Image (spheres, grey):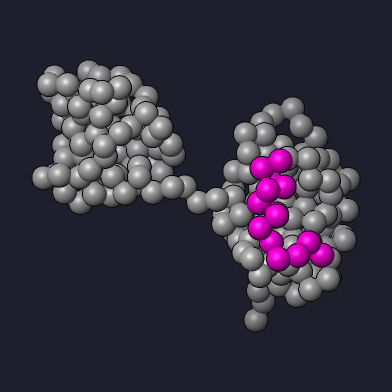
Amino acid sequence: MGREAICNCDWAGNTVEVKALLETGEIILRGAIRKRIPFSGIKSVQAKAGRLCFTVGGEPVQLFLGAAAAAKWASAITTPPPTLSRKLGIQDKTIVRIIGAITDETLREALAEAAHISAKDAGLIVACVDSPESLHAALRDAKAQLLKGVPIWMVYAKGPGHAINETAIRSLLRENGMIDTKVASVSPKYTALRFIYRKTE
């Protein structure tokens, strides 16, 4: 989420100045109090009189963020994160074409939200690539639909030591006139980049 603030923190009656960071799934406190607080451990969240109030392990905590920031932080903590199907743009009317083998259970569950899995009349393409060869093959196989404006998600393994990575994917697709428009974490092991053809006048 990338929000941060220098503010007073009252932790169980002890008030000190901290740097508070609101990240995806956790609050990080640095300074006189150093803690990483996962959202799952935060209870009774509310914004009140310019303070973000909550409890952790039964202890009351207040971050003096100001009214606007406290409300935004409270909403971010209490709002469920978007599902993978939503992040990928898969709805109950979406026809998805799959290229490559789906080995990730989280991705498989997201694809189950689509209306159909079919290469015909697809509104979205999901390609799982694990090598330069499979990347080239996916681009070649999908080219006719891509030229019609159908977006493609390139799903690949996270981290170093794999045969394909973000740089290689971006380089090849940009060389072929495409632009990346979104990134989505698929699971602890996989991530994805969304591409469409660059519009020309």
Q: Quadrant of the N terminus?
A: top left
Res 43 quadrant in image: top left
Regarding residue 30, the answer to whether it shows in the image is: no
The residue shown at (62%, 34%) is: 188
144, above or below 90, in the image: below
Residue 199, percent across and down? 65, 74
Viewer-proximal residue among 76 and 143: 76
Label tally: 0
Residue 171, percent across and down? 72, 50
Res 94 quadrant in image: bottom right
Viewer-proximal residue among 21 and 165: 21
The residue shown at (21%, 28%) is: 61
Residue 80, percent across and down? 43, 47
Q: Which residues are magenta?
A: 105-118
Regarding residue 123, the answer to whether it shows in the image is: yes
Please say whether residue 117 is one of the residues in the magenta stretch. yes
The residue shown at (75%, 65%) is: 116
Res 14 quadrant in image: top left
Q: Quadrant of the C terminus?
A: bottom right
The residue shown at (70%, 54%) is: 111
Viewer-proximal residue among 10 and 55: 55
Please say whether residue 39 is one of the residues in the magenta stretch. no
User: Does residue 23 appear left or right of residue 169 in this picture?
Assistant: left
Residue 13, percent across and down? 12, 21
50, above or below 87, in the image: above
